[in-house]
Structure formats: C-alpha cells, structure tokens
Amino acid sequence: MNKITKKSFYSFLSLYLISSFIFLSLASYWFFTAQLSTEMNSNFHKMNNTSNKIVADVIYADLMKKELKLQGFPYANIALFDINKNLKYGSLLRPVDFSKDYYKEEMTFSLISKTLGGHLGLEYIVIQSNECSFNVAKLKNTVAYTALMVALIIILIAVLLSYMFLKPLKDKMQEVENFIKDTTHELNTPISALMMSTSRIKEKESYDKKIVTNISISTKQLYEIYASLTFLNFDTSSEKDEDLNFDDVVQNSIEYFNELLSKKKMTLEFTHTQCSLHISPSKAKMLINNLLSNAIKYSPPNTKIIIDLKENSFSIKDEGIGIAQDKINMIFKRFARASSYAGGFGIGLSIVDSIVKEYEYSINVHSQENKGTRVIIHF
C-alpha cells in the first residue's frame, strides 16, 4: 500500500475501532449495572426470607416450649441477640452495627431484623453473607472476559472490513499510478522525437521532409494523448449533436493518420456507402481515431487495414497481433491493456465503449492471436 492508502486504511480502522469500543464499553457498563442491581435485590430478598424462616422457628420453639435448634444456612452466618444485644445463638463474620437494617462492609452484607418480638428472650436476628460479593466479583470477571473476546472479534472484523472497503481505493490508486507511468512513457516518445527532430533542423538549417514528417507524427501523437485525457476529465456533454456525414469523418481520420501509416509501410483499404449519424462531432472523431490508432499501433509493418462503412455499421479489420480470447471481455475497461506489444495506457477503447453506450450503439470484437482483430459497430 502507498502512503495515501495506508493513511486511509488506518484512519478508517481507528474510527471503526474507537466507535465500536465506545459502544462496547457503554453496553458492558449497562449490562454490569443491570446485573449488579439484580444481584443486590436477589441477595436482600434471600436474606430477608432466611430471616422469616428463623422467626418462624423461634416462635414455634417458644409456643411448643421446645429448645431452639438454629438451622444452618450454607451461604450465610446467623446470630440471635437479646434486647441488650448480647449474643445468644450462632456466630458472625464481623462486628454488627445495630443502627442499620441492611448494609455492606468490605465483602460482607449484613441484615438486622427486629421481628422476634421477645420470643425466647430474643430481639434481633443478624444475617451476614459474602455470597453476593463473590457473585459480583464473578460477574465482573465474566463481563470483562466477554468484553475482551468481543473486542478481539471487533478488531478482526475491523481489519477485514478495512481491507474490503479500501480494496477498491487501493486498486484505483494502483491504476492511477500505472496510468501516470504509462502516460509519462507515452509522452516521452513523441517529445523525444520532437526534440531530436528540432535539433536536426537547427543543425542542417534547411528543410528536410523526413524530419518534418517525424515532427508532424509526434505532434499528432501528443494531440491524441491530450484529446483522450481531455475527454476523460472534462464534460463534453455541452457539445450538441448534429447530423454528420460519417464517411467524411472516417476519411478525415484516415488522412490524419496517413503519415503514420506510411512510416510503418502499412496500406489501408476503405470501402463505404453514404452513412449519416446524429452525433457530436468530437465524439464521432474520437470513435474513429481510437479504433484506427489501435489498429495501426498493434499491427506490425507491411500489413493491411480494411475499413468498411455501411449505412448502419462500421467495421475495421487489421492484421495485427490479435487479442487472447480470455482478455476480450476486459479490453473496454478503463486502464486495462490486453498486451504490452505497443505503448498506451488503456483508455482508448474505454472511450469508444462509453460513446457506443451513450448513443445506444452495439459493438462486437472478433479476434485471433497473431492473425488480427475486427471491430464492428452497429448504429
């Protein structure tokens, strides 16, 4: 990943994790608070029920004139006091504060009940238990462990989502980087040719047809690059469609590329009938120029290009390197290149495809490797 992609990745990841952890913390706090309240209430009612059972036992022993047998409760310590707060039965975990009814001191919960009414000379029931504190500690550990597991899952999901959501950005950035490299390479060739030709003209100080031809070809190559980039980056919808004699557009394009055809010693055969289209002039020119430019670019010297224009269709056939069958479906994607045989940065056929779709034409490509390609547009 480059710097921009890394920055986007970590920004998205940080935002996702921070928001998720805030939500997780609030959810954990709410759950723990709710469970703590439930546990505290449950503990109070449990101790209160135990107190009622002891009261029943004391009253029964007093009425039946029997000796009180204080039953044991595994979760709590029980103690019975007289009116002077002297211990008569049982044992305690810690000293009692008789001024309170229900309180917690350190880990111990204490409940003081005054419901014995003097039976058997007893006045106070004191119940002390650590069970609630142990349950709360266990609850804390459970919530903390669960929150940790959820946090790890969130981190894993965040990383996966970051890669998933940023993959298109990463791919697009890679396309842009490749595009810049290809554009630099494409511009370098005609610019170098222009500089060399200009230097030779200065040295000779005379007219040289070959040098001027090279300058003309290089200038046209630069213009085609400029036209393609302009089409991609600027709105061309403001140009109105008009009725065009399309065979004139094709003829002008052939003349435009005639110098390049001659340089590669290629021949071009053009057969046509009158064809009229309602289309933007610049888009009609881009449509033909890109197809013809590709046919020339991907054909070796001393080969032929055949252009056939009919009333409702246009076809261009070359004897070039052809396209592999598994790559035909991707040649219209922007920045996609089926071959590295010649220069280019994969936008010519993308422009053709966009124009074809805009005017609801159809396009078919028939190609065979090392034998050539035929492109047909049906109007």
Image (cartoon, rainbow, N blue to C red):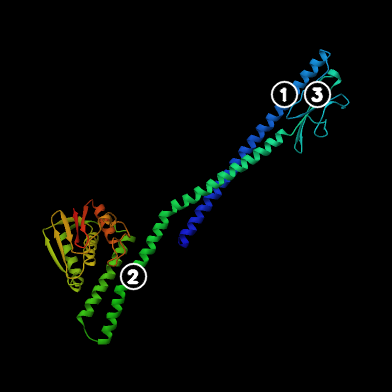
Front: mark 1 or 3? 1
Residue 312 x, y percent position in the rendering: 15, 53
Question: Residues under labels 2 and 3: Cα distance?
Answer: 97 Å
Label number found at residue 140: none
Question: Residues under labels 1 and 3: Cα distance?
Answer: 14 Å
N-terminal of the pair, mark 2 or mark 1, is: 1
Label number found at residue 114: 3
Q: Is residue 128 left or right of residue 193?
A: right
Q: Is residue 204 left or right of residue 16?
A: left
Q: Quadrant of residue 190?
A: bottom left
Foreground of the two, 139 or 5:
139
Residue 374 x, y percent position in the rendering: 19, 58
- Classify mark 3: residues with Cα within 10 Å, few (<14), some (14-19) or many (20+): some
Residue 9 against residue 112 in the figure, above or below: below
Residue type, numbered disc 1:
Asn
Label number found at residue 185: 2
**Viewer can see residue 60:** yes
Residue appearing at x 25%, y 76% in the figure: 215
Residue 366 against residue 96 in the figure, above or below: below
Q: Is residue 108 left or right of residue 10?
A: right
| Disc 2 secondary structure class | helix
